[in-house]
Image (cartoon, grey):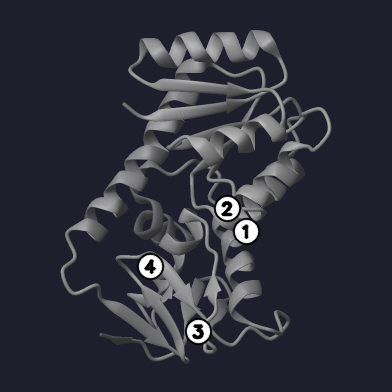
Amino acid sequence: MPHVLVVDDEEDIRSLLTGFFQRHGHQVSVAMDGESAFSILDSLPIDLVILDVMLPGEDGFSLCRRIRSTSRVPVIMLTAVADHVDRVVGLEIGADDYLVKPFDARELLARVKAVLRRTAQTDTVAAGTVSRPVLTFANWRLDIARRELRSPDNTLVMLSNAEFDLLLAFAENPQHVLTRDQLLDLARGTTHAVFDRSIDVQVARLRRKLDTDTTKPSLIHTVRGGGYMFTPDVRRG
């Protein structure tokens, strides 16, 4: 039974989602602000967070940054503002998906299931890996089973699930031009949202973590009219 944490300051939303997700086979915890949300995250095994942007005190964007700095738990953000910029910001800080209020609870459930399915698939692959293959490139190490990225000086670099999946798609197809659609299929499967420009957002985040000078990216090159290319040699083992 997946355990979902709903973080929203509106009691009606918390009650609605609690009853709806429980009827559809989910365990639900609720929080109305960041302090109570982190108390739950620290004490219970949460599989996914549904996080409202407009919260009292610390807003959802700040909370998502804090979650992503220490955890890869999937995050779906909710907002009352139908603003493209807000959606991009949410994806940039590591959210896995984004939905605008008012929303259809059935659509939110479908998105939750899609994100949890992707997470379960990657966990299954990791659990079934005996030798824990590692991909190395330009002195970076990508541990597939542990879903860890380590820098040339062996520092652990935190990646969201979406960022890890995208980097893995690049590393397994080095020196090939990959279109946005191909990257969406490789990194997120056929359950990805229509908002395919999210790939551009995730690429920008990866570049900031892989390159000290993002104005001259050395590992992920943009191919005009084509997509992106991962340029370094990649070794397995």
Query: What residue does disc 4 label?
Result: 169
Please give left or right for residue 220 compared with residue 23 in the image.
Answer: right
Q: Position of residue 139 (x, y in %)?
A: 46, 91
Badge 2 element: helix
**Considering the image in quadrants, where does the C terminus appear?**
bottom left
Residue type (three-letter) at the residue carrying disc 4? Ala
> What residue would you read off at disc 1?
201
Q: Quadrant of residue 104?
A: top right
Residue type at the position of mark 2: Ser
Q: Which residue is mark 2?
A: 198
Looking at the rendered structure, the number of numbered marks drawn on it comes to 4
Question: Foreground: 1 or 113?
Answer: 1
Within 10 angstroms of label 2, few (less than 14), some, or many (20 or more) residues?
Answer: many
Real-space Cα separation, disc 3 to disc 1, in angstroms: 26 Å
Whichever of labels 3 and 4 marks the residue nearer the N terminus, that label is: 3
Kind of element beneath mark 3: loop
Tags 2 and 1 touching, CB below 8 Å: yes
Circle 3 packing at 10 Å, graded few (<14), some (14-19), many (20+), is few
Q: Nearer the viewer, mark 3 or mark 2?
A: 3
Task: Find residue 157 and report its image quarter.
Answer: bottom right
Whichever of callouts 2 and 4 sits on the residue coming sooner in the sequence is 4
Which label was assigned to residue 154?
Answer: 3
Q: CA distance from mark 2 to mark 1?
A: 5 Å
CA gap, disc 3 to disc 4?
22 Å
Looking at the picture, how far across and down is residue 229, in whole percent? 47, 78
Viewer-closest of 34 and 152: 34
